[in-house]
Image (cartoon, coloured by chain):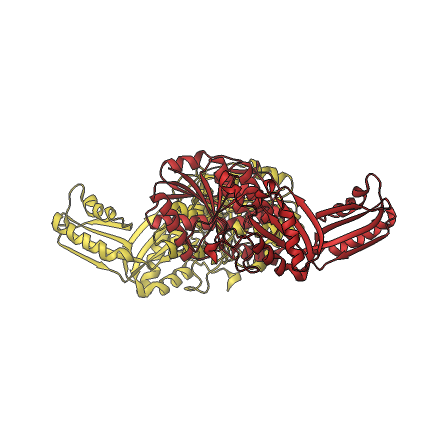
Chain colours: A red, B yellow
Amino acid sequence: MALIVQKYGGTSVGTPERIQAVAEKVAAVRERGDQIIVVVSAMSGETNRLISLSKEINERPDPREMDVLVATGEQVTIALLSMALHKIGCPARSYTGGQVHILTDSAHSKARIQDIDDARVRADLEAGRVVVVAGFQGVDEHGNITTLGRGGSDTTAVAMAAALTADECQIFTDVDGVYTTDPRVEPKACRLEKITFEEMLEMASLGSKVLQIRAVEFAGKYNVPLRVLSSFEEGEGTLITFEDEGMEQAKISGIAFNRDEAKLTIRGVPDQPGVAYSILGPISGSNIEVDMIVQNISEDNTTDFTFTVHRNDYPKALELLKETAEIVGAREVDGDEGIVKISLVGVGMRSHAGIAATMFETLAKEGINIRMISTSEIKISVVVDEKYLELGVRSLHEAFNLAMEAAE
Amino acid sequence: MALIVQKYGGTSVGTPERIQAVAEKVAAVRERGDQIIVVVSAMSGETNRLISLSKEINERPDPREMDVLVATGEQVTIALLSMALHKIGCPARSYTGGQVHILTDSAHSKARIQDIDDARVRADLEAGRVVVVAGFQGVDEHGNITTLGRGGSDTTAVAMAAALTADECQIFTDVDGVYTTDPRVEPKACRLEKITFEEMLEMASLGSKVLQIRAVEFAGKYNVPLRVLSSFEEGEGTLITFEDEGMEQAKISGIAFNRDEAKLTIRGVPDQPGVAYSILGPISGSNIEVDMIVQNISEDNTTDFTFTVHRNDYPKALELLKETAEIVGAREVDGDEGIVKISLVGVGMRSHAGIAATMFETLAKEGINIRMISTSEIKISVVVDEKYLELGVRSLHEAFNLAMEAAE
């Protein structure tokens, strides 16, 4: 007998009919003898409806009251799903975040889970009941309702799975798994059967928005096997787990990319200790997040320093960098908004030489000029001109043989 | 400094604009230096919307899950009202029934309040905050969400007022007070400035549906002065309180009536101990509530027995009575659906003779035949033919001088 946690997002529970379809899936798990906890989001559209209501009353609503308001969304879903389960003869009981008791800190609208009391849930599971839990919400030590922020239902599911040492945490979404790259860019993109937590983190943060990063981190930290599946189609989805021998084969798992970056360069900075801090300090001081950073020493003992930021932050970052250039006595500052980042991700990289060489060769053959390179243990990222995005992704997909025969 | 509890029903908080209007009223109480707790219902239409959603999924939803579902209605209102108060610079904090902590028994959909923990609410009041409480809901000893049944927000308000020994509990509705009789029947009907708890109970149960009976009982039991006011018009409303000297003047407070009754009679029942039980036992055994009961002994040592039931229960009651008639050897059974009950209510009756005589004389003058009479300490009820309802109410209103000069 396994213990499964399933999570269904807003689209999956968007109408009474869809809630009934979810009930069928859930009841089937129990039928085959497994225990099951279901975590659900608000019905699609409901959270936005509540936010609009609040905006009509107060443009800048108090975060505590906002949490009281939006937490009703998931509470409606847990009641309806439990009723749907009863209808098909499946015993079930609903719990709000506060009832479970999912204890969080008091950071309203972006609270973090601190502890879960599993006693009531375990008692229900042992009595043969399906446990239906409201995602996205918890309660602080004073009994105030908190929320984990948008998409936080994934985190709730993983946290429940961790607290109860579930055998698997299944996240049902509107995609049927994690792909080697975005199928809209490369139609030959394939669903991955397995991917490691580290790879998934690199893929997610690079733009493959299948799962919340926090949920993946959480799952990795507590060793919860995580599976992404489609709510609407049959299939095995993608299992996100720890590295094993079988996974050693694949050098590269996927190709991620990001269109939302801009590049800034400061040239001819007199090289001395603390120069990196004097350049990046004012940037991060303005709450601008820096992604890639590259530094080279020139022959004349000055340094060139290049980094990327979110495209929205580009004008502000450029202004700050110009101020810094005057202070540190740099030669010039320039920037470029017309760039994209393409990244190869794969744990296989660790034990296979030549990945970087193959990547650079492939891009060179297509006449794609590389503007910036950054590497990590399981990732190589390059910055190229925006116009080369599709060509770059497709040629790399081909070069690393990511399209499986089955998919051709 | 007084402590006031105010309760606003669904119509009063039915739109964002109305919620803002309520916020203005509430803030004004705090401005003048009083402490205030506000109890609110779900926005009008919301509870029905939730019930319809549930019916789409399960015709006979589990009561526990139904409570989880409908309790979200008030939770939305408390958040929105708190936001509206913040908007106009009035500190406020919202509480669900579970957060207050309003402890109830576990009778889902009709739970009864057992205890209220006033610690958090008192701390907020002392800190100068308005406390906004979700009406109609509580939590049982296991932490399950419960509801008090429709209209239970009145009960929540009175219970909060009792627990915190408030100076007054103000119920805002769509009428501006309690009237001497229904103004749709007698246009000269007047708003009462004061009425006793006992009178209010008689008026309410007789059809003047201004307040929940349970709330009035509760207020009487815990000595909470209760005031009914209009959400939409200025005015003092009607204060429901204990009898005082000033109230001794009025013999009659009002005239209630009920169109929903039917009358049944069994004649020629051999008079012997236990005859009343043998007649009414089968009726109440079928969950039919009996209202008025009259019994007379005839000369031939048999008895005639007449009682009234809700008109919906008439066919079933008649069938049961015919069976009983055969068993006890009664002469005949008949019934009448075309009747109404008219009642004079007033604590002044206790110390004033002749009220009944004046009543019967007034009806006789108008040619209205009395079919049945029943009296209590503060009430005299008569059953008359349906067609005489309006004439009866108006002539009694006139005879007891209930139309005040101001209203003429």
Q: Residue B145 is drawn in which quadrant? A: top left
The reply to whether residue B312 is visible in this rendering is yes
Percent of width and height locating residue B128: 65, 42
Along the line of sight, which residue is nearer the eye, A161 or B386?
Answer: A161
Quarter that holds the N terminus of chain A: top left
On the image, the x and y values in percent for residue B404 come to 49, 59
Q: Answer left or right for A109 relative to B64.
A: right
Quarter of the image where one finds residue B275: top left
Is residue B162 in sight in this rendering?
no
For the residue pair A368 and A172, the one nearer the viewer reads as A368
Q: Measured from the top left, where is residue A385 in percent x and y? A: 69, 59
Left or right for B325, reference B388? left
Q: How many marks?
A: 0
Residue at coordinates 50% horizontally, 38% vertically from top-left? A245
Measuring from the top left, give residue B133's x and y in whole percent: 54, 46
